[in-house]
Image (cartoon, grey):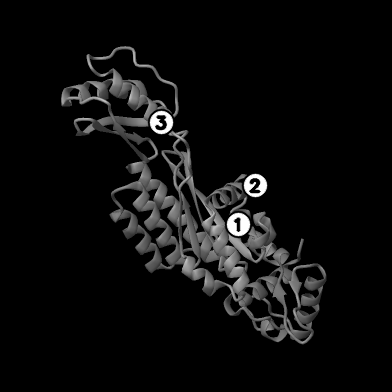
Amino acid sequence: MLDERKTAILQAVVEDYIQTAQPVGSSHIAKAPGVNVSPATVRSEMAALEQAGYLHQPHTSAGRIPTEKGYRSFVDSMIGEGKSPGKLARGQAAAVREFFDQAHGELEAMLSDTSRLLSGLTNYAAVVVAPGVDAAAIRSVQLVDLAPQVVMVVAVLANGVIEKHTIELATEVSAEVVADAGRAVADAFVGQTLGSPVSVESRALGTDELIDAAIGALSGHESNDIVFVDGRDRVAQSFEAVEQVRHVLTVLERQLVVVSLLRDVLDRGLQIAIGNETGVETLADCALVVAPYEIGGETAGTIGVLGPTRMDYSQALAAVAVVSNQLGHRLTEG
C-alpha cells in the first residue's frame, strides 16, 4: 500500500508517460500538480517506487516509466472507492447520444457501427460482441413465401437478434399453407429459445413438410459468437514495434480468442486488464478495457477497447461505459 506522496508521484509519472511516451524525470514531476515537494525528494521517492516494482528505469541516465504493477496501482486508485473514472468531452458525449438516437435497422449493422464509434472515441481498436442467441427467448416467428418451393423462416429474438433461414421444399406450397404452417410454428416456438426441443400438436392439411423443415431450421441452430472489430488501422499508431502491431492484429483476427479474452476478463471481475493480466502472452504490452451491455436487464454482450499499456485509461473507461449503457438502452427499446 503506497502512502499519499508516493501515490501522487506515481500518478504524475503515469499521466506524463501516457501523454509523451518518454521516460519521466524527477525535476519534471516535482512541478506536477499535487506533488509539491523538491526534486531531491521526488528522486528519492521514485527510487523507492522503482525498488518496489512500480517504476522502471530503461537507461541509467534516463527517467522512469511505469511497470505493469505501476499501471495497476494507478488504475485501482483511479476507479477505487466509487470514484468516477472520468467523463467524455461534451462534444463526444453529444456525438454518442446522436448516434444512438439515429441508430436503426439491422442489429449487425448497428453493432458494426458501434465498434466504429467506439474506436473513433478512443483512437484504439474497438470490439463489440453481438448478443448470444442460445439464452434469448424467441419473440416472434414468421414464414415468408419467396417462391412456390422456397420459404424463409424469420425468428426475432428478445435480445434484438434476427435469425433467417431459407427452406427449399420438394413440392410447391400455397400462400395459405405457408400462413397455416407459420401459425403452428409460432405457437410452438414463441417463448422458447433456439435449439429448444418443440412439438407441434395440430397441423393443417398440407403443412407437414413445411413445418418439419421450419422446426429443423430453428432447432438445428448452432451458436456462433459474432464479433465486430474496428480500428485496426489505429493499432499501428499505438505501438512503436512492428512485431507488436503484428501480434495485436493477429489476435483481433481470431474471433474465438477475442470472445474468450473479453469474457475471461469480465469473469475475473475486472474492468481493465493490463499486460499479462490479459492472459495472452502476445498482449503483454497491451491493455484492455471492457464492459458488458444489457438488454432488458440481462447481460447480452460485451464491448471493449484494446490499446497499449500507456493508454488514456480515464478516457477509455468513460467511452466504454457510456457506449455500453447507450447500446443497452437502444437494444432494449427495440
Q: Is disc 3 surrounded by few (<14), some (14 to 19) or many (20+) residues within 10 Å? A: some
Q: Amino acid at mark 2?
A: Arg
The picture quadrant where one finds residue 47 is bottom right
Q: Is residue 75 above or below residue 56?
A: above
The circle on residue 137 is: 3
| Mark found first going from the N terminus, 3 or 1 | 3
Q: Nearer the viewer, residue 87 or 154?
A: 154
Residue 93 makes an appearance in the image = yes
Q: Residue at x 78, y 67 (%)?
A: 53
Contact? badges 3 and 1 (CB < 8 Å)? no
The circle on residue 272 is: 1
The picture quadrant where one finds residue 250 is bottom right
Q: Amino acid at mark 3?
A: Ala
Is 102 positioned to the left or the right of 118 in the image? left
Assign the C terminus to one quadrant of the image. Answer: top left
Which element type, helix, strand or loop, lies under badge 3? loop
The circle on residue 123 is: none
| Mark found first going from the N terminus, 2 or 3 | 3
Q: Position of residue 279 (x, y in %)?
A: 67, 54
Assign the N terminus to one quadrant of the image. Answer: bottom right
Residue pointed to by mark 2: 268
Of circles 2 and 3, the one toward us is: 3
Q: Position of residue 322 (x, y in %)?
A: 45, 56
